Image (cartoon, grey):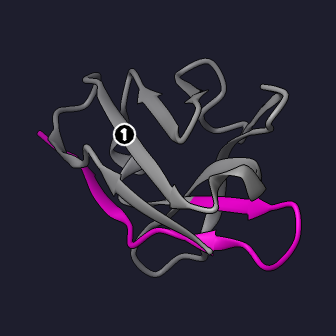
Amino acid sequence: QVQLVESGGGLVQPGGSLRLSCVASGSIFLINTLGWYRQAPGKERELVATITRGSRTDYADSVQGRFTISRDNAMVYLQMNSLKPEDTAVYYCRADPIIGREVWGQGTLVTVSS
């Protein structure tokens, strides 16, 4: 079993930066890919960025060049720069284990507004 807890959300002005963190606990040796997803009000949950155990990264087109995902043992981070109002959403951490179903964190709210 893997558990995930996110932190780092908050209110930021357009053009600002935030860093989200997610700590994994439990059977972390089972984790293959870690990722960040987001869900804006009235919209479907969407992929933001993922990073594999081998550190291969993938980004949504909408955040490419502004967001950076990184990983350190049981932690995964999302550095968000040049934030826009349309980045406002609840951000979720997700772990894809080698076996079994994906695991989600509880989410952290990011609000980009002046």
Name the residue that disc number 1 marks: 20
Residue at 17% in and 37% down:
12
Give the quarter of the figure containing the C terminus.
top left
Amino acid type, residue under disc 1 in the picture? Leu
Identify whether 54 is placed above or below 6.
above
Q: Where, quadrant-wise, is the N terminus in this rendering?
A: bottom right
Q: Residue at x 64, y 49 (%)?
A: 35
User: The magenta stretch spans which residues?
Assistant: 94-114
On the picture, is 2 further left or further right than 54? left
Return the residue nearer the eye: 22 or 58.
22
| Quadrant in the picture for residue 61 | top right
Please say whether residue 108 is one of the residues in the magenta stretch.
Answer: yes
Q: Position of residue 65 (x, y in %)?
A: 62, 18
User: Residue sitting at 38 percent across and 22 percent down?
Assistant: 82
Q: Quadrant of residue 59?
A: top right
Q: Is residue 9 magenta?
A: no
Q: Residue at x 88, y 70 (%)?
A: 99
